[in-house]
Image (tube, rainbow, N blue to C red):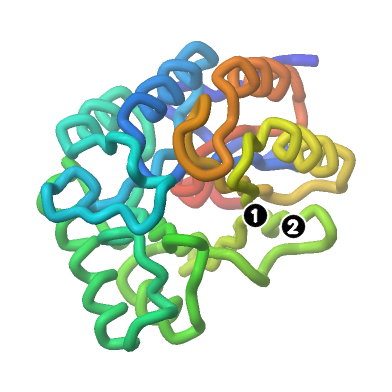
């Protein structure tokens, strides 16, 4: 079967029945550079979501999974200049559902304002805001969607047993559902979910991943990611794109 016509310029081919997004969270410096390099080997863009304050001395890791060295906006601008997608993943990686809603709204705003100031070419109106812990409420989602094009979170608005979103066909804003696995190595889980999705009638599957080779919650292996992309490139009915790139080229 023919490979996908996806280069670093990106295009969403409407003939595809299956869209797959590997959505990597947190901003682990070592892992994210390696994730980008592996995607580049196949002419693909990586979907990288980073904690806005993760590089600041004031950042307090909320759990053991964010104790790995996080990158800074020099790193994120470098990776963006190489064609990869950099999106916000909260101000400080706290569960916004566990705090007063006014404070949670302030943290969403602070995150987006920091991105606007420090990430070259960032526009909130084109962004996907990725909720920390995939935890949100209807009120927080409504607030975030008043500022960004899409949110990624857990829960509903996903179709069927394969947990896939419908192919985008409207102007938005979009509520994107995802699934994730951890804290152990996620290679086997990813393989199971991707195979189930490939056997389905189609849609848009978003798998929320983190680092490589032991970094972060539910990491995958470098060799597995390389092998997965190699195999996915050979499926003529599937396209592998970052979430924001999909929304640029909706049906």
Residue that mark 1 sits on? 179
The answer, for residue 150, to whether it is visible in the render is no
Residue at figure coordinates x 34%, y 37% from the top left: 68
In this image, 117 relative to 133: left or right?
left
Q: Is residue 241 above or below residue 149?
A: above
Q: Which mark is residue 55?
A: none
Image location of residue 119, percent across then percent down: 18, 44
Which picture quadrant has residue 185? Answer: top right
Q: Would you place residue 2 above or below residue 84 in this image?
A: above
| Extreme-top residue of the structure | 41
How many neighbours does mark 2 have within 10 angstroms: few (below 14), some (14-19), or many (20 or more)?
A: many
Q: Residue 30's x, y, as percent?
A: 35, 25
Q: Which residue shows up at 61% across the image and 47% down it?
A: 182
Q: Secondary structure at mark 1?
A: strand
Q: Which residue lies at the image location 56% right of the left edge and 51% below the top edge?
A: 250
Q: Please report contact status of discs 1 and 2: CB closer than 8 Å, yes or no.
A: yes
Nearest the viewer among 150 and 67 is 67
Which circle's residue, 1 or 2, is located before the other in the chain? 2
Q: Is residue 143 visible?
A: yes
The residue under the point 11% across, 48% down is: 57
> Neighbour class for label 1 at 10 Å: few (<14), some, many (≥20)?
some
Residue 163: numbered disc: 2
Q: Position of residue 248 (x, y in %)?
A: 46, 48
Nearest-to-viewer mark from 1 and 2: 1
Distance (Cα) linking label 1 and label 2? 7 Å
């Amino acid at each position: 079967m023919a490979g996908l016509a996806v280069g670093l310029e990106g295009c969403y081919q409407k003939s595809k029945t299956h869209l797959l997004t590997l959505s990597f969270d947190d901003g682990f410096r070592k892992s994210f550079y390696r994730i980008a390099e592996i995607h580049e080997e196949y002419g693909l863009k990586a979907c990288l979501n980073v904690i806005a304050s993760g590089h600041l001395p004031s950042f307090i890791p909320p759990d053991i999974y964010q104790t790995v060295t996080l990158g800074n906006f020099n790193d994120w601008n470098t990776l963006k200049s190489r064609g990869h997608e950099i999106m916000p993943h909260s101000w400080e990686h706290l569960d916004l559902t566990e705090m007063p809603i006014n404070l949670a709204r302030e943290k969403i705003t602070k995150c987006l304002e920091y991105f606007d100031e420090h990430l070259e070419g960032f526009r909130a109106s084109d962004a996907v805001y990725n909720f920390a812990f995939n935890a949100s409420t209807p009120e927080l989602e409504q607030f975030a969607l008043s500022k960004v094009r899409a949110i990624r979170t857990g829960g509903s608005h996903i179709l069927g047993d394969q947990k896939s979103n419908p192919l985008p066909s409207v102007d938005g804003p979009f509520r994107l559902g995802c699934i994730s696995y951890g804290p152990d190595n996620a290679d086997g889980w990813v393989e199971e979910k991707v195979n189930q999705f490939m056997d389905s009638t189609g849609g848009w599957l978003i798998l929320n991943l983190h680092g490589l080779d032991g970094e972060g919650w539910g990491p995958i292996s470098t060799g597995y990611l390389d092998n997965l992309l190699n195999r996915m490139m050979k499926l003529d009915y599937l396209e592998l794109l970052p979430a924001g790139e999909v929304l640029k080229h909706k049906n």
